[in-house]
Image (cartoon, helix red, strand yellow):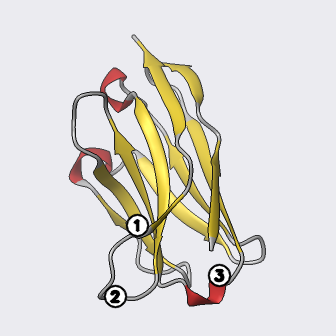
Amino acid sequence: VQLQASGGGLVQTGGSLKLSCEASGRTYTTYSIGWFRQIPGKAREVVATIAWSGRNPNYADFVKGRFAISKDNAKNTVYLQMNDLKPEDTATYYCARKGSSHSRYNDWGQGTLVTVSS
């Protein structure tokens, strides 16, 4: 499965961006998709996850109420709507796939940079 992430950019504090993660290939082998981010000098952290069915969204505490993960089943695309962005949300965002509940997120898309200016 290949993942293509897009949608990053520069936005002011309080603004919004919508990231997209398009999956191709043997997508039916996907268990869930996650959005992660990496801030320079820090470890990669999970932002939100969603089952491949489009159900069971989960969020990190630091984005609850501001970000929303969703999936368009017809387009095999997972979205991350980011609202009320803060400078501390500045990071490279990645989407990743896991093939089962017991596996790790092993397939990664390229990152997309989100920069929030103060």
Point 44% across, 36% down: residue: 92
Q: Label 2 sits on what residue type?
A: Ser
User: How far is mark 2 from mark 1, CA to CA?
Assistant: 12 Å
For the C terminus, the quadrant is: top left
- If you read the primary sequence from the N terminus, does the residue marked by circle 2 or circle 3 appear first? 3
> What SS does tag 3 mark?
helix
Q: Label 3 sits on what residue type?
A: Thr
Which of 77 and 82 lies nearest the eye of the viewer? 77
Residue carrying label 2: 101
Q: Relative to 24, does residue 67 appear above or below in the rendering?
A: above
Residue carrying label 3: 27
Q: Relative to 94, does residue 16 appear above or below in the rendering?
A: above
x, y percentage for residue 76? 70, 72
Q: Which label belongs to residue 49?
A: 1
Point 31% across, 32% down: residue: 39
x, y percentage for residue 20? 64, 52
